[in-house]
Amino acid sequence: MIRQRIEKGRKLAEKHHLPRSHQVIVSNIIKAPVSLLYYMWKNDKARNQWMSNSGIIIRKASRNHSLCMVWLNNQSGVEVYFFPLGDNECQVTVQHNQIPDLKEELKMREFWSKSLERLDIIMRT
């Protein structure tokens, strides 16, 4: 009888268990005001200047603080956080969640790193 309860508990746990997913967190300090960096992310035309393949939909935005987006390629979630470090410097952190496998995780880590580097270069010119 105890064994039956344990097995029933396992089946319930498996039923509600989410599949394992991967996550990428990439951060960069960029010399630019937080308001300009926020604009460069939020505005589609501005974002396309530095981010290739920007198939995203913004779900929620908190001005000069954060953006929550859906990555259309695999319906995963992307969050971007802005941390001002002074008048003309800001840390930008990208957190990409629900990545299906390790191969895609490595690909997205490189994508976000290079995207933040391109944004940094544009902000310097």
Image (spheres, rainbow, N blue to C red):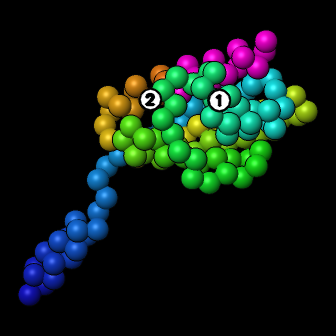
Residue 31 left/right relative to 114: right
Residue 95 appears in view = yes
Picture disc at residue 45: 1
The part of the chain drawn in magenta is 112-125
Q: Quadrant of the N terminus?
A: bottom left
Q: Is residue 115 magenta?
A: yes
Residue drawn at the location 80% of the way across and 36% of the way down: 34
Quarter location, residue 39: top right
Tell me the SS state at disc 2: helix
Residue 12 left/right relative to 54: left
| Location of residue 71 with respect to 12 vertically, above or below | above
Residue drawn at the location 19% of the way across and 71% of the way down: 10
Amino acid carrying label 1: it is Lys
Residue drawn at the location 32% of the way across and 41% of the way down: 100
Residue 28 left/right relative to 3: right
Q: Is residue 18 magenta?
A: no
Q: Residues within 10 Å of mark 2 (few under 14, many from 20)?
A: some
Q: Quadrant of the C terminus?
A: top right
Q: Residue furthest top?
A: 125
Picture disc at residue 108: 2
Q: Position of residue 40 (x, y in %)?
A: 71, 31
Q: Position of residue 124 (x, y in %)?
A: 78, 15
Residue 113 appears in view = no
Q: Residue furthest bottom?
A: 1
Per the model, the C-alpha gap separating discs 1 and 2 is 22 Å
Amino acid carrying label 2: it is Met
Looking at the magenta stretch, what is its main secondary structure? helix
